Amino acid sequence: MAKVKVRGKGSVYKMERGKSRGKCRKWQLRAEVDGEFEGDEGYVKTRVFHGTYSEAQDAKDEFVAAIERGEVRRERGMLFPAYAEAWLAERAAKVAYDTLQKNRCHIVCANMHLSKARIEEIRPGRTWMRCTRPSETARALQAGPCPEPTCATYP
């Protein structure tokens, strides 16, 4: 994974309004990241942290270090196949071999429909991702929006 440069040291913002810094237990860690390629302006990477202010400061330092090591990937602008491969690589250490193979098969099927889709363009919407037979898929596409939030479509 590519290493990136963080501008400054990062920052910690309080997320619970009306509470003092001593009482607040929800923080947003922010780091400004330089563009990854020429012509690409920088962006802000954030993460939510639960704990005290001192713990949030330590977590912010670790968050910035993880970004600079390249462990925190940029998802905006990423195409579905690249995101899926990164997800599979991350998942390989967590699940059994058979589960990983099943996930790989699902990714291959999803790539047929979403190979040119950017991650931010994929939205909940239709049931066709859950259908197994072509006739079911056709009916699902005609039915309209999906009531289940786990389905996805590409506009």
Image: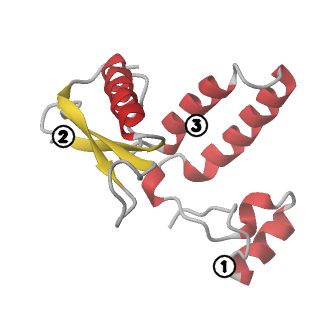
Residue 55, position as x, y percentages in the image: 42, 32
Q: Is residue 80 left or right of residue 149?
A: left
Amino acid tagged 2: Gly
Task: Give neighbour class at mark 1: few <14, some 14-19, many 20+ (Cα, 10 Å).
Answer: some
Q: Secondary structure at mark 1?
A: loop
Q: Can you identify the residue that label 3 sits on?
A: 84
Which quadrant, please, contains the N terminus? top left
Q: Locate residue 3, reporting x and y percent.
A: 31, 19
Residue 97 to residue 84: above or below: above
Please tell me in which quadrant of the rendered image residue 135 appears: bottom right
Q: Which SS class for mark 3?
A: helix
Q: How many marks?
A: 3
Q: Residue at x 82, y 61 (%)?
A: 131
Q: CA distance from mark 3 to mark 1?
A: 24 Å
Residue at image coords 12%, 38%: 39
Of badges 3 and 2, nearer the viewer stands: 2
Q: Residue furthest bottom?
A: 143
Would you name the residue on which mark 1 appears? 145
For disc 2, the marked residue is 42
Q: Residue at x 35, y 65 (%)?
A: 17
- Asked if residue 152 can be seen in this view, the reply is yes
Nearer-the-camera pick, 149 or 58: 58
Position in image of residue 73 (x %, y %) = 41, 32
